[in-house]
Image (cartoon, helix red, strand yellow):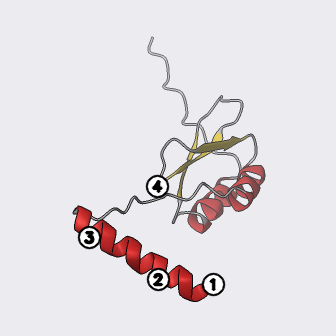
Amino acid sequence: MATAAPKPRRIPDYYAFCDVALRHTAHWSLTYEHGAPAPYAARHKANADIVLAASRVDVLEQALIDFAPPARVRPYLPEEQQERACEQRLLAAVLREAA
Protein backbone atom coordinates (compact mmCIF):
# COMPACT_ATOMS: atom_id res chain seq x y z
CA MET A 1 0.00 0.00 0.00
CA ALA A 2 1.50 3.33 -1.08
CA THR A 3 1.39 6.29 1.24
CA ALA A 4 -0.02 9.52 -0.03
CA ALA A 5 2.38 12.36 -0.59
CA PRO A 6 2.05 15.08 2.04
CA LYS A 7 0.05 18.11 0.99
CA PRO A 8 2.18 21.16 0.28
CA ARG A 9 2.19 23.58 3.17
CA ARG A 10 0.82 27.03 2.71
CA ILE A 11 2.31 30.27 3.93
CA PRO A 12 0.14 31.75 6.67
CA ASP A 13 -1.00 35.26 5.73
CA TYR A 14 0.10 34.56 2.16
CA TYR A 15 -1.44 37.71 0.68
CA ALA A 16 0.10 39.90 3.38
CA PHE A 17 3.43 38.17 2.73
CA CYS A 18 3.14 38.96 -0.99
CA ASP A 19 2.26 42.59 -0.26
CA VAL A 20 5.31 42.99 1.98
CA ALA A 21 7.53 41.27 -0.58
CA LEU A 22 6.33 43.62 -3.32
CA ARG A 23 6.77 46.75 -1.19
CA HIS A 24 10.36 45.85 -0.30
CA THR A 25 11.46 44.06 -3.48
CA ALA A 26 13.94 46.80 -4.44
CA HIS A 27 16.23 45.96 -1.50
CA TRP A 28 15.10 42.65 0.02
CA SER A 29 14.39 39.05 -1.02
CA LEU A 30 11.71 37.52 1.20
CA THR A 31 11.30 33.83 2.00
CA TYR A 32 9.24 31.61 4.25
CA GLU A 33 10.56 28.46 5.94
CA HIS A 34 7.98 26.10 7.42
CA GLY A 35 8.74 24.92 10.94
CA ALA A 36 11.34 27.60 11.73
CA PRO A 37 10.92 29.63 14.95
CA ALA A 38 11.09 32.79 12.80
CA PRO A 39 9.80 31.54 9.43
CA TYR A 40 9.49 34.91 7.66
CA ALA A 41 12.92 36.07 6.51
CA ALA A 42 14.36 38.81 4.35
CA ARG A 43 17.86 38.86 2.84
CA HIS A 44 19.32 42.18 1.71
CA LYS A 45 20.05 42.13 -2.02
CA ALA A 46 23.21 44.27 -1.90
CA ASN A 47 24.66 42.64 1.22
CA ALA A 48 23.68 38.98 1.48
CA ASP A 49 25.12 38.78 5.01
CA ILE A 50 22.22 40.90 6.29
CA VAL A 51 19.20 38.73 7.10
CA LEU A 52 16.17 39.74 9.16
CA ALA A 53 13.71 37.12 10.41
CA ALA A 54 10.45 37.24 12.34
CA SER A 55 7.66 34.99 13.55
CA ARG A 56 4.95 37.15 11.95
CA VAL A 57 4.83 38.92 8.60
CA ASP A 58 3.75 42.24 10.15
CA VAL A 59 6.73 42.15 12.50
CA LEU A 60 9.07 41.45 9.58
CA GLU A 61 7.66 44.40 7.66
CA GLN A 62 8.15 46.72 10.60
CA ALA A 63 11.75 45.52 10.89
CA LEU A 64 12.29 46.19 7.17
CA ILE A 65 10.89 49.70 7.59
CA ASP A 66 12.94 50.47 10.72
CA PHE A 67 16.22 48.81 9.76
CA ALA A 68 18.70 50.82 7.70
CA PRO A 69 21.63 48.73 6.47
CA PRO A 70 25.03 50.37 6.72
CA ALA A 71 26.04 52.50 3.78
CA ARG A 72 28.26 50.80 1.28
CA VAL A 73 31.45 52.80 0.90
CA ARG A 74 33.09 52.66 -2.47
CA PRO A 75 36.81 53.23 -2.35
CA TYR A 76 38.10 55.99 -4.56
CA LEU A 77 41.78 56.59 -5.08
CA PRO A 78 43.35 57.85 -8.29
CA GLU A 79 45.82 55.38 -9.68
CA GLU A 80 48.74 57.68 -10.19
CA GLN A 81 50.60 59.51 -7.45
CA GLN A 82 50.50 62.72 -9.50
CA GLU A 83 46.70 62.50 -9.80
CA ARG A 84 46.41 61.95 -6.03
CA ALA A 85 48.57 64.98 -5.30
CA CYS A 86 46.53 67.12 -7.72
CA GLU A 87 43.27 66.00 -6.15
CA GLN A 88 44.58 66.71 -2.65
CA ARG A 89 45.52 70.26 -3.73
CA LEU A 90 42.05 70.77 -5.20
CA LEU A 91 40.37 69.52 -2.03
CA ALA A 92 42.60 71.73 0.14
CA ALA A 93 41.66 74.74 -2.00
CA VAL A 94 37.95 73.95 -1.61
CA LEU A 95 38.37 73.69 2.18
CA ARG A 96 40.22 77.00 2.34
CA GLU A 97 37.43 78.71 0.40
CA ALA A 98 34.77 77.20 2.63
CA ALA A 99 36.53 78.33 5.83
**Which label's residue is closer to the chain start, 2 or 4?**
4
Instruction: Measure the alpha-carbon separation of dots 4 and 3.
Output: 31 Å
Q: Earlier in the sequence, mark 1 or mark 3?
A: 3
Compared to 34, does 99 lie above or below? below
Q: Which residue is mark 1?
A: 99
* Residue 82, position as x, y percentages in the image: 24, 68
The percent coordinates of residue 39 (x first, y second) are 66, 37
Q: Nearer the viewer, mark 4 or mark 3?
A: 3
Placement of 72 over or under 10, stated as above or below? below
Report how far apart the C-alphas of labels 2 and 1 lie in the structure. 10 Å
Amino acid at circle 3: Glu
Q: Is residue 77 left or right of residue 45?
A: left
Q: Which mark is residue 77?
A: none
Q: Amino acid at mark 4?
A: Ala
Q: Where is mark 2, residue-wise?
A: 93
The front one of 73 and 49 is 73
